[in-house]
Image (spheres, rainbow, N blue to C red):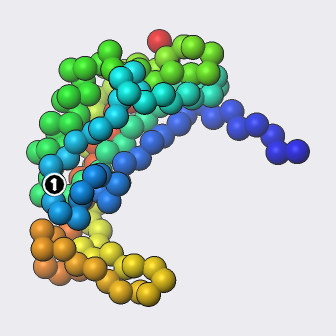
Amino acid sequence: MVPLLQPKIVQLTIRYTDWWNWENNQALELTFAPGRNARAYLPNSCEKFLLELETTELMKDQLKQQVQLITRAKEHWKWPRMDGRCLVLDEEVPVKDWEWMGPTKFVEAPRGHAFTYAHHPSGDEMKYCVKILTFKLS
């Protein structure tokens, strides 16, 4: 028998390539919110929820706008636990920002062909920007 997981911290990461139509350089848009149109039930053990959003430096301002939308619509960004309690935006914890250098090309498995995109810079690396929002048990 596998023991039940009882995580105190749960993290959801939306990577650059998880955004809708990233391949076509479309504007960033979060199409879900847990209190609006998505039901996400966290385990009762969860006391902290981290939402990590990543994009490229080119889309950095749009990422900032998405974070502002979340902070302005806090009522839609409550992450429910199985017991009915919710995790809400922790306004005492500032949004964390960090950057890293990563690939400009993505290899398609299993053929191994490296895809490049017109909106990516030349070369092998580009800057990725990340923002992390923290939610706490209310």
- The quarter of the picture where residue 124 lies is bottom left
* Residue 43 to residue 98: above or below: above
* Residue 84 in view of the camera: yes
Question: Which residue does the image show at 19% across and 74% down from the upper left?
Answer: 117
Residue 104 spot, x, y in % from top left: 24, 73
Seen as rendered, the residue at the extreme right is 1
In this rendering, position of residue 125 left or right of residue 43: left
In which quadrant is the N terminus drawn?
top right
Q: Secondary structure at mark 1?
A: loop
Question: Depth check: 11 or 39 in front?
Answer: 39
Residue 35 spot, x, y in % from top left: 39, 21
Residue 90 spot, x, y in % from top left: 37, 21
Mark 1 neighbour class, 10 Å CA radius: few under 14, some 14 to 19, many 20 or more: few
* Residue 46 to residue 114: above or below: above
- The quarter of the picture where residue 95 lies is top left
Which residue is the site of mark 1? 26
Question: Which residue does the image show at 62% across and 28% down from the upper left?
Answer: 43
Question: Label 1 is placed on what type of residue?
Answer: Gln
* Residue 57 in view of the camera: no
Question: Which residue does the image show at 27% across and 39% down from the upper left?
Answer: 30
- The quarter of the picture where residue 46 lies is top right
In this rendering, position of residue 104 left or right of residue 113: left
Seen as rendered, the residue at the extreme front is 37
Residue 129 spot, x, y in % from top left: 24, 53
